[in-house]
Amino acid sequence: MATITATESYHNDRKFKNVGNDVYEIKVPGVRLYCFKDQIDGLSSKLIIATNGGSKNNKKEQTADIKRALQIKDRYFTAKNSADTTLNYISKSHEN
């Protein structure tokens, strides 16, 4: 994920693919991880928000996994744009 966030426009359709509405599928052998990109106002850092994942399964289950990722993304941005929401970004220098 560090490679993806460090690049303005990361492109690798085999490992990192837009599956619709800016939800991305990260592929590793036997596993699919779904995510989307965001940025916190005032910070240059890009964020990759992981939503859910699944095994390399049949098309019906993959479609359901993508639908769930889209729902999570929509809820995230609804919450982010709410006046009641505060996002805190903890930089790497604060990690243990």
Image (tube, rainbow, N blue to C red):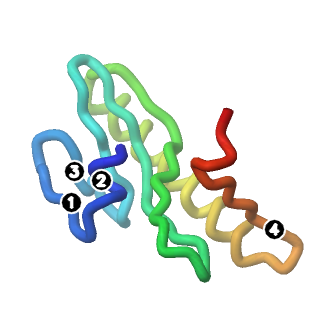
**Dots 2, 1 in contact, CB < 8 A:** yes
Outermost residue to the right: 84
Query: Depth check: 48 or 55 in front?
Result: 48
Query: What label does residue 86 carry, if any?
Result: 4
Q: Mark 1 points at which residue?
A: 10
Q: Callout 4, which amino acid?
A: Thr
Circle nearer the viewer, 3 or 2: 2
Location of the C terminus (image quadrant)? top right
Q: Mark 3 points at which residue?
A: 17
Disc 4 to disc 2, C-alpha distance? 25 Å
Q: Is mark 4 on a helix, strand or loop?
A: loop
Mark 3 or mark 2, which has the lower sequence index? Answer: 2
Q: Callout 2, which amino acid?
A: Ile
Q: In this view, does 80 lie to the left or right of 27?
A: right
Q: Callout 1, which amino acid?
A: Tyr
Q: Name the residue under label 2.
A: 4
Please rate how many residues cluster around mark 2, counting C-alpha atoms within 10 Å: few if below 14, some from 14 to 19, many from 20: some
Mark 2 or mark 1, which has the lower sequence index? Answer: 2
Image quadrant where residue 10 sits: bottom left
Q: Is residue 9 left or right of residue 13?
A: right
Residue drawn where x is 12% and y is 49% of the image:
13
Q: Is residue 93 left or right of residue 3?
A: right
Q: Callout 3, which amino acid?
A: Lys
